[in-house]
Image (cartoon, coloured by chain):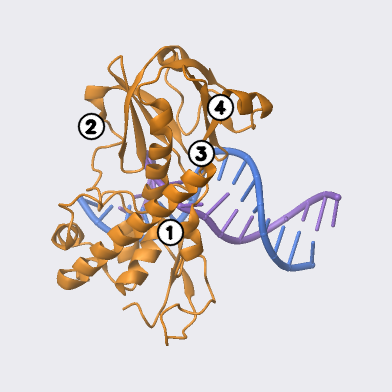
Chain colours: A orange, B blue, C purple
DNA sequence: ACGCCCACCTGGAGGC
DNA sequence: TGCCTCCAGGTGGGCG
């Protein structure tokens, strides 16, 4: 579910309800996700004020007033749902609502993650940047300084297919299976092309496509958010605009192309692309 | 160091 | 209806 646009959408949805508010009650409904919760997790969160919510790669970072940061990752199936006090009492917990936060304003945030590939940790602010989870992460694709040249440098010498390189968070962060497929399509680059051959103008095109696809999806997530008034884990309207992802056998959307979208498996993940438009 | 494969876990979809 | 297989938006560890 969550690649950069989804995580960013969740961040924007949570911010108005959490930032400058106090977490007054915490319910931890199981002892571990992908990794165990830290000791006294609920006790350490209770009573804390949230100073801000940042995003790094696909991680959410909740800055707390005691000098600690709550690090959250949504894994494959993680979602955050928002309820007000009234609607919360009407909705019993789902079996995968693992963490429940109540705020001083009467909002309830539920972290739901069926597959439990997500995680929640508490670390001192100063330890976050150097944390094992963040070591080696590549640049943020939406940073202005991230351009074709920056990508090209990172791809130098990589013999792996460009699709696999884009999924590797050491190359750049935030891009997952959907947006890797979509960006490669927009850029007209074959997912099977060896990564080190993506240089110069081709790298420039690919970076433009990555930014475009991420920004458009954030916009669409935002409109979903406005309509549903909750940061769902579900995809926003962008999913109705996939050009190739999950469209095996459909016509390539390029006018006049007519080729059928093809599915192949790379690095254990499905790749969707047009063999004619992507070289 | 690199590139590939798998495991982690649950649920939904589709075939029979 | 039920059972089986395959597939899913991520990540990190282990292997050659």
How packed mark 3 is, by other alpha carbons closer than 10 Å (few <14, some 14-19, many 20 or more), is some
Whether labels 2 and 3 belong to a single chain: the reply is yes
Using the rendered image of the protein, determine whether residue A165 is visible from the camera's viewpoint.
Answer: no
| Residue occupying the point 60% across, 33% down | A96
Using the rendered image of the protein, determine whether residue A279 is visible from the camera's viewpoint.
Answer: yes
Q: Are marks 2 and 3 in contact (CB under 8 Å)?
A: no
In primary-sequence order, the first of circles 1 and 3 is: 1
| Residue occupying the point 33% across, 55% down | A215
Looking at the image, which is closer to me, A134 or A14? A14
Left or right of A229 on screen, residue A193: left
Q: Are marks 1 and 2 in contact (CB under 8 Å)?
A: no
Left or right of A194 on screen, residue A276: right
Pointer 3 residue: A230
| Residue occupying the point 45% across, 77% down | A253
Q: Which mark is residue A129?
A: 2
Residue C9 percent coordinates (x, y):
45, 52
Badge nearest the viewer, 2 or 4: 4
Q: Which mark is residue A62?
A: none
Name the image quarter holding residue A136.
top left
In primary-sequence order, the first of circles 2 and 3 is: 2
Q: Are marks 1 and 4 in contact (CB under 8 Å)?
A: no
Q: Are marks 2 and 4 in contact (CB under 8 Å)?
A: no
Q: Is residue A115 above or below residue A85?
A: below
Name the image quarter holding residue A274.
bottom left
Looking at the image, which is closer to me, A147 or A103? A103
Which secondary structure, mark 2?
A: loop
Residue A168 percent coordinates (x, y):
31, 53
As measured in the structure, the alpha-carbon distance from the residue carrying label 1 to the one carrying label 4 is: 32 Å
Pointer 1 residue: A178
Whether labels 1 and 4 belong to a single chain: the reply is yes
């Amino acid at each position: 579910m969550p690649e950069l646009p989804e995580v960013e959408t969740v961040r924007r949805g949570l911010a108005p309800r959490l930032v400058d508010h106090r977490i007054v009650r915490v319910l931890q409904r199981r002892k571990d996700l992908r990794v165990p919760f830290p000791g006294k997790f609920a006790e350490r969160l209770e009573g804390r004020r949230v100073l801000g919510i940042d995003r790094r790669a696909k991680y959410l970072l909740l800055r707390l007033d005691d000098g600690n940061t709550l690090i959250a990752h949504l894994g494959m199936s993680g979602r955050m749902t928002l309820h007000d006090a009234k609607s919360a009492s009407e909705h019993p917990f789902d079996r995968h609502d693992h963490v429940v936060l109540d705020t001083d304003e009467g909002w309830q945030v539920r972290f739901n993650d069926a597959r439990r590939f997500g995680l929640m940790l508490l670390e001192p602010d100063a330890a976050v940047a150097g944390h094992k989870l963040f070591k080696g992460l590549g640049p943020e694709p939406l940073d202005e300084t991230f351009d074709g040249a920056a990508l090209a440098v990172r791809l130098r010498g990589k013999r792996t297919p460009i699709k696999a390189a884009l999924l590797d968070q050491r190359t750049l962060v935030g891009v997952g299976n959907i947006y890797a497929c979509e960006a490669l399509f927009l850029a007209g680059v074959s997912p099977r092309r060896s990564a080190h051959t993506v240089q110069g103008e081709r790298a420039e095109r690919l970076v433009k496509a990555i930014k475009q696809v991420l920004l458009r999806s954030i916009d669409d997530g935002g409109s979903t958010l406005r309509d549903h008034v909750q940061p769902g884990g579900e995809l926003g309207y962008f999913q109705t605009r996939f050009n190739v992802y999950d469209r095996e056998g459909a016509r390539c959307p390029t006018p006049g192309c007519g080729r059928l979208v093809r599915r192949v498996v790379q690095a254990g993940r499905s790749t969707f692309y047009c063999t004619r438009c992507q070289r």
